[in-house]
Image (cartoon, rainbow, N blue to C red):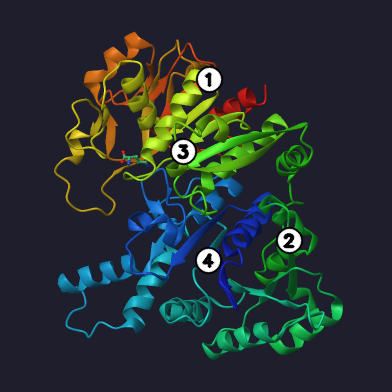
Amino acid sequence: MAKYIFVTGGVSSSLGKGIIAASVAKLLQARGFAVTIQKLDPYINIDPGTLNPYEHGECYVTEDGAETDLDLGHYERFLNIKTSQANNITTGRIYQHVIQKEREGAYLGKTVQVVPHITDEIKNYIKSLDAGHDIVITEIGGTVGDIESLPYIEAIRQLRWEMGKDNCIVLHLTLIPYLSAAKELKTKPTQHSVKELLGFGIQPDILVCRTEHSLDSSIRRKLGLFCNLDAQSVIEARDADSIYDVPLLMLKEKLDTNIIGKLRLVDRQEPDLTRWKSFLGRLKNPLQEIKIGLVGKYIELQDAYKSILEALTHAGATNEVKVRIIPIQSASITKENVSQTLSEVAGIIVAPGFGERGIEGKIIAIQYAREEHLPFLGICLGMQCAVVEFARNVLNLSGAASTEMSADTAYPVIKMMEEQQHIRQKGGTMRLGAFDCELNPNSRSFAIYNQRKHISERHRHRYELNPDFVQPLDTAGMIAAGVNPQNNLVEIVEIPSHRWFVGVQFHPEYKSTVENPHPLFVDFVKECSR
Ligand code: GLN
């Protein structure tokens, strides 16, 4: 049976529960334990696939095609493991399942209630990751005291009671604010948040305290006294330069040995963080700095393109280059300002997306990159825009477009996939998850992927390069460098005469990890730093 660690949050949202959970997991993994992480989200959407990035940041996609919370991206990047639908459950999914069972008559005439039916369902989902793991870490979204997270807190209380404290611990992440007027760190909000947890029957086993200043021993003792904890179980989590520093900061605080002791695990080895540290070494000692433009419509939101930013960080470290990302609002790009806007960047990425806003700006930026031999990586919608641009300005197909933006264009170079045309429901119905791609041996991508003919990448889209235009594009100099072997869908386009011009229908960013940086990003950054 696996041991369980629950991660709850108090005082404030955005404290970085996902990063703390991933860091704990990393340390335990480095000690030789098989670890996985799960996120329970208290909202009623079945998954975040239908959420606007303004609401919830990036939607992360797993191999099995689940549209999930962006924290799963952190889990994969930190642990170098693959997650799946089972790693992200929402209240919506739990209720959907319970209601479906009720309709089937599975409750045999009983009244269906939050306790025990919803809480049982939560417990089943938590335990579904048991097999094959020594430790399951479960992060509870939201902040303790939120109405919507109550059933989760109750489920944890029950699990602790059933499994015993040696098998199941609660790590509570909280904030210790610094009042500059008083020049003091304040513990009261944390005391209240722990009281709130106690009110629900849960004594946290470890407090992890986000803070801008160091916690001295007297503050740790005070927090311990008010929260029933020994001072060693009050852990300081100072703001770090990089999220990738956090596992080492937690190691310094001995969080891993503390957990191992509390869970009565037999320690296996000193943590092996060799690859992690060598990544950090390269991340922190760049030989040069480059600027890369990220052209998109949600650029003011840090979280909207999370996986792309992290993939660039991995690729930068691999090349010993600091990548400074210059966010560029696509809607503000015009023919007049494009050369000025892109004058300082060494290359551009055109981001994924949906809908009309900012499309023409993306196309103008791509035309500039193509004509001026600026390295270009187009991802999903970014690739589709590159095809539209090439069709309009090289094939001279005036008004060429994607039918997503312009349903009655004379030249639908990007069109809705056949299999999508009869779908009416929005949630979970895109082409999602991992699909095979066969690379053209004469392409740049083939070389970039280390001469592998068969690759697999993750997807999230409804539109595709219209097969009728593959030949004309090829003749004019834009080749299909990768296609899906089952249905011939074009997965990669390239312009061989260009310095570095690659558009991908898939999302390479989802698969880049600290220990396996994605080759497309690595090669793109390498070219940009030349
Ligand atoms: N909107 C485009 C499609 O559905 C691109 C999607 C994306 O960029 N993820 O095909």
Q: Residue at label 1? A: 372
Q: Residue at label 2? A: 250
User: In whole angstroms, how far apart are the C-alphas of marks 4 and 2?
Assistant: 17 Å
User: In whole angstroms, how far apart are the C-alphas of marks 4 and 1?
Assistant: 47 Å
Q: Residue at label 4? A: 139
The residue lying at 55 percent from left, 35 percent from top is: 341
The amino acid type of the residue labelled 4 equals Glu
Q: Are marks 4 and 3 in contact (CB under 8 Å)?
A: no
x, y percentage for residue 291?
A: 64, 35
The amino acid type of the residue labelled 2 equals Met
Answer yes or no: is residue 228 visible: no
Label 1's element?
Answer: helix
The answer to whether 43 is drawn above or below residue 442 in the figure is below
The answer to whether 9 is drawn above or below residue 74 in the figure is below
x, y percentage for residue 506?
A: 40, 34
x, y percentage for residue 123?
A: 42, 71
Left or right: where 93 falls relative to 230: left
